[in-house]
Image (cartoon, rainbow, N blue to C red):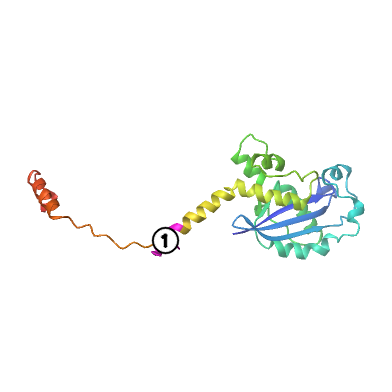
Amino acid sequence: MREVILDTETTGLDPRTGDRIIEIACIELLNHLPTGRVWQAYVNPEREVSVAALDVHGITDSFLKDKPVFSEIVADFLEFIGDAPLVIHNADFDIGFLNAELGRLGFPPLPASRGKDTVALARRKFPGSPASLDALCKRFNIDNSARTKHGALLDAELLADVYLELVGGRQAGLELAGARSTIAIGISGAPAPGVAVRPPRPHAPSAAELVAHEALLKDISDPIWRR
Protein backbone atom coordinates (compact mmCIF):
# COMPACT_ATOMS: atom_id res chain seq x y z
CA MET A 1 0.00 0.00 0.00
CA ARG A 2 1.56 3.29 -1.12
CA GLU A 3 0.90 6.48 0.88
CA VAL A 4 2.55 9.89 0.88
CA ILE A 5 3.29 11.92 4.00
CA LEU A 6 2.80 15.59 3.04
CA ASP A 7 3.43 18.92 4.72
CA THR A 8 3.51 22.54 3.56
CA GLU A 9 4.68 25.90 4.83
CA THR A 10 2.86 29.05 3.75
CA THR A 11 2.94 32.84 3.82
CA GLY A 12 -0.04 32.93 6.19
CA LEU A 13 -3.16 31.13 7.29
CA ASP A 14 -5.76 31.65 4.56
CA PRO A 15 -5.41 30.98 0.82
CA ARG A 16 -8.71 32.81 0.23
CA THR A 17 -7.02 36.10 1.18
CA GLY A 18 -4.05 35.48 -1.10
CA ASP A 19 -1.69 33.50 1.13
CA ARG A 20 0.51 31.11 -0.83
CA ILE A 21 2.61 27.97 -0.39
CA ILE A 22 6.35 28.48 0.13
CA GLU A 23 7.48 24.90 0.81
CA ILE A 24 6.15 21.41 0.09
CA ALA A 25 7.67 18.15 1.36
CA CYS A 26 6.55 14.60 0.60
CA ILE A 27 7.80 11.25 1.92
CA GLU A 28 6.78 7.99 0.27
CA LEU A 29 5.52 5.14 2.45
CA LEU A 30 4.93 1.53 1.51
CA ASN A 31 2.91 -0.44 4.04
CA HIS A 32 3.32 2.49 6.48
CA LEU A 33 7.16 2.47 6.29
CA PRO A 34 9.32 5.11 4.55
CA THR A 35 10.95 3.86 1.35
CA GLY A 36 13.64 6.55 1.24
CA ARG A 37 11.97 8.42 -1.65
CA VAL A 38 11.49 12.07 -0.74
CA TRP A 39 10.29 15.08 -2.74
CA GLN A 40 10.76 18.62 -1.45
CA ALA A 41 10.67 22.11 -2.97
CA TYR A 42 10.75 25.71 -1.85
CA VAL A 43 8.39 27.95 -3.80
CA ASN A 44 8.51 31.67 -4.58
CA PRO A 45 5.04 32.83 -3.46
CA GLU A 46 5.23 36.08 -5.43
CA ARG A 47 4.16 37.96 -2.30
CA GLU A 48 5.58 38.73 1.12
CA VAL A 49 5.63 36.27 4.01
CA SER A 50 3.55 37.52 6.93
CA VAL A 51 5.31 38.35 10.19
CA ALA A 52 3.26 35.74 12.06
CA ALA A 53 4.18 33.01 9.57
CA LEU A 54 7.83 34.04 9.62
CA ASP A 55 7.86 33.56 13.39
CA VAL A 56 6.63 29.99 12.87
CA HIS A 57 8.90 28.72 10.08
CA GLY A 58 11.66 31.33 9.72
CA ILE A 59 11.60 31.24 5.88
CA THR A 60 12.33 34.76 4.67
CA ASP A 61 11.38 36.69 1.54
CA SER A 62 15.05 37.03 0.59
CA PHE A 63 15.52 33.26 0.79
CA LEU A 64 12.50 32.65 -1.46
CA LYS A 65 13.10 35.31 -4.12
CA ASP A 66 15.19 33.07 -6.41
CA LYS A 67 13.08 29.90 -5.88
CA PRO A 68 10.78 28.53 -8.63
CA VAL A 69 7.14 29.59 -8.72
CA PHE A 70 4.46 26.95 -8.21
CA SER A 71 3.81 26.52 -11.95
CA GLU A 72 7.42 25.38 -12.38
CA ILE A 73 7.23 22.59 -9.81
CA VAL A 74 3.61 21.46 -10.10
CA ALA A 75 4.24 18.71 -12.67
CA ASP A 76 6.97 17.09 -10.57
CA PHE A 77 4.82 17.38 -7.45
CA LEU A 78 1.78 15.74 -9.04
CA GLU A 79 3.93 12.98 -10.52
CA PHE A 80 5.43 12.17 -7.13
CA ILE A 81 2.15 11.97 -5.23
CA GLY A 82 0.38 10.08 -8.02
CA ASP A 83 -2.95 8.76 -6.78
CA ALA A 84 -1.69 7.79 -3.32
CA PRO A 85 -3.57 8.75 -0.15
CA LEU A 86 -1.99 11.81 1.48
CA VAL A 87 -1.15 11.54 5.18
CA ILE A 88 -1.31 15.10 6.56
CA HIS A 89 -1.40 16.69 10.00
CA ASN A 90 -4.50 18.94 9.80
CA ALA A 91 -5.31 17.87 6.25
CA ASP A 92 -7.92 20.55 5.51
CA PHE A 93 -5.28 23.28 5.86
CA ASP A 94 -2.72 21.80 3.46
CA ILE A 95 -5.23 20.52 0.91
CA GLY A 96 -6.93 23.92 0.94
CA PHE A 97 -3.65 25.63 0.05
CA LEU A 98 -2.73 23.03 -2.58
CA ASN A 99 -6.13 23.32 -4.24
CA ALA A 100 -5.82 27.12 -4.31
CA GLU A 101 -2.48 26.78 -6.12
CA LEU A 102 -3.79 24.09 -8.47
CA GLY A 103 -6.91 26.12 -9.22
CA ARG A 104 -4.87 29.14 -10.30
CA LEU A 105 -3.26 26.96 -12.97
CA GLY A 106 -6.45 25.22 -14.10
CA PHE A 107 -5.69 21.84 -12.51
CA PRO A 108 -8.51 19.83 -10.90
CA PRO A 109 -8.59 19.99 -7.09
CA LEU A 110 -7.37 17.22 -4.84
CA PRO A 111 -10.43 15.51 -3.31
CA ALA A 112 -10.71 15.97 0.43
CA SER A 113 -11.14 12.20 0.68
CA ARG A 114 -7.48 11.72 -0.31
CA GLY A 115 -6.34 13.28 2.94
CA LYS A 116 -5.68 11.05 5.94
CA ASP A 117 -5.79 13.54 8.79
CA THR A 118 -3.47 12.49 11.62
CA VAL A 119 -5.02 15.10 13.93
CA ALA A 120 -8.39 13.36 13.60
CA LEU A 121 -6.74 9.95 13.92
CA ALA A 122 -4.95 11.00 17.12
CA ARG A 123 -8.11 12.46 18.64
CA ARG A 124 -10.02 9.24 17.98
CA LYS A 125 -7.25 7.17 19.51
CA PHE A 126 -6.57 9.47 22.48
CA PRO A 127 -9.78 11.42 23.20
CA GLY A 128 -9.23 14.61 25.15
CA SER A 129 -5.43 14.55 24.76
CA PRO A 130 -3.36 17.15 22.88
CA ALA A 131 -3.02 16.26 19.19
CA SER A 132 -0.32 18.68 18.05
CA LEU A 133 2.72 17.20 16.31
CA ASP A 134 4.94 18.15 19.27
CA ALA A 135 2.52 16.54 21.75
CA LEU A 136 2.39 13.32 19.73
CA CYS A 137 6.17 13.22 19.43
CA LYS A 138 6.35 13.49 23.22
CA ARG A 139 3.71 10.75 23.66
CA PHE A 140 5.62 8.34 21.42
CA ASN A 141 9.13 9.34 22.59
CA ILE A 142 10.08 10.64 19.13
CA ASP A 143 13.03 13.05 19.22
CA ASN A 144 11.88 16.43 17.91
CA SER A 145 14.66 18.48 19.50
CA ALA A 146 15.72 19.78 16.05
CA ARG A 147 12.29 21.38 15.59
CA THR A 148 13.08 24.88 16.80
CA LYS A 149 11.14 26.20 13.77
CA HIS A 150 8.55 24.56 11.57
CA GLY A 151 9.85 23.21 8.27
CA ALA A 152 7.90 21.05 5.83
CA LEU A 153 10.56 18.37 5.40
CA LEU A 154 11.42 18.03 9.09
CA ASP A 155 7.73 18.03 10.02
CA ALA A 156 7.00 15.37 7.38
CA GLU A 157 9.80 13.19 8.77
CA LEU A 158 8.42 13.52 12.29
CA LEU A 159 4.90 12.88 11.05
CA ALA A 160 6.04 9.68 9.33
CA ASP A 161 7.21 8.38 12.74
CA VAL A 162 4.04 9.59 14.48
CA TYR A 163 1.78 8.04 11.84
CA LEU A 164 3.53 4.71 12.18
CA GLU A 165 2.84 4.76 15.91
CA LEU A 166 -0.79 5.80 15.39
CA VAL A 167 -1.43 2.84 13.08
CA GLY A 168 0.23 0.28 15.31
CA GLY A 169 3.92 1.02 15.78
CA ARG A 170 7.08 -0.27 14.15
CA GLN A 171 7.80 -3.05 16.64
CA ALA A 172 4.28 -4.48 16.55
CA GLY A 173 4.37 -4.56 12.77
CA LEU A 174 7.70 -6.38 12.70
CA GLU A 175 6.50 -8.92 15.23
CA LEU A 176 3.43 -9.66 13.17
CA ALA A 177 5.53 -10.01 10.04
CA GLY A 178 7.76 -12.50 11.83
CA ALA A 179 4.75 -14.47 13.04
CA ARG A 180 3.34 -14.62 9.52
CA SER A 181 6.67 -15.92 8.20
CA THR A 182 6.77 -18.63 10.83
CA ILE A 183 3.23 -19.71 10.03
CA ALA A 184 3.98 -19.81 6.30
CA ILE A 185 7.01 -22.05 6.92
CA GLY A 186 4.89 -24.38 9.02
CA ILE A 187 2.21 -24.68 6.35
CA SER A 188 4.70 -25.32 3.58
CA GLY A 189 6.34 -28.11 5.58
CA ALA A 190 9.82 -26.71 5.04
CA PRO A 191 11.99 -26.66 8.18
CA ALA A 192 13.48 -23.38 9.34
CA PRO A 193 17.17 -22.93 8.42
CA GLY A 194 19.51 -24.51 10.95
CA VAL A 195 16.81 -26.66 12.59
CA ALA A 196 17.70 -30.38 12.78
CA VAL A 197 14.97 -32.71 11.50
CA ARG A 198 14.36 -35.58 13.94
CA PRO A 199 13.22 -38.99 12.61
CA PRO A 200 9.68 -40.02 13.59
CA ARG A 201 9.43 -42.06 16.81
CA PRO A 202 7.17 -45.13 17.01
CA HIS A 203 4.31 -44.95 19.53
CA ALA A 204 2.87 -48.49 19.30
CA PRO A 205 1.61 -49.90 22.66
CA SER A 206 3.62 -52.60 24.41
CA ALA A 207 2.20 -56.07 25.21
CA ALA A 208 1.71 -55.13 28.88
CA GLU A 209 -0.18 -51.98 27.85
CA LEU A 210 -2.49 -54.01 25.62
CA VAL A 211 -3.29 -56.44 28.51
CA ALA A 212 -4.01 -53.52 30.87
CA HIS A 213 -6.26 -51.95 28.26
CA GLU A 214 -8.30 -55.15 27.85
CA ALA A 215 -8.75 -55.41 31.62
CA LEU A 216 -9.99 -51.84 31.75
CA LEU A 217 -12.55 -52.45 29.01
CA LYS A 218 -14.12 -55.30 31.00
CA ASP A 219 -15.15 -52.79 33.70
CA ILE A 220 -16.75 -50.37 31.22
CA SER A 221 -20.31 -50.78 30.00
CA ASP A 222 -20.44 -50.76 26.18
CA PRO A 223 -16.99 -49.25 25.61
CA ILE A 224 -16.59 -47.39 22.34
CA TRP A 225 -13.41 -49.33 21.60
CA ARG A 226 -15.58 -52.47 21.05
CA ARG A 227 -17.86 -50.84 18.47
Residue 69 at what x, y percent from top left?
85, 60
**Is-magenta flag for residue 217?**
no
Place of residue 210 in the rendered image (x, y in percent of width and height, measured from the top left): 12, 53
Residue 185 in magenta stretch: yes
Q: Which residues are magenta?
A: 182-195
Q: What residue did someone put label 1 on?
A: 195
For the residue marked with disc 1, what is the amino acid? Val
Q: Kindly give the residue lying farthest to the left in the view shown.
A: 218
Res 117 seen here: no
Quarter occupied by the C terminus: bottom left
In front of the other: 168 or 18: 168
Q: Quadrant of the N terminus?
A: bottom right
Q: Nearer the viewer, residue 193 or 220?
A: 193
Q: Residue at x 65, y 42 (%)?
A: 141
Q: Say which of 215 and 43 sits in front.
A: 215
| Residue located at (89% from left, 43% from top) | 51
Find residue 86 and report its horizontal and vertical position in percent: 67, 55
Residue 125 seen in render: yes
Residue at position x 10%, y 53% from top?
226
Q: Residue furthest top?
A: 128
Mark 1: few/some/many CA within 10 Å (<14, 14-19, 20+): few
Residue at (64% x, 48% y) in the render: 163
Q: Regarding mark 1 in the picture, which secondary structure is present there?
A: loop
Horizontal side of 42 relative to 209 (left or right) equals right
In the displayed structure, does residue 79 sit left or right of residue 196?
right
Determine whether, in the image, residue 138 is placed left or right of residue 61: left
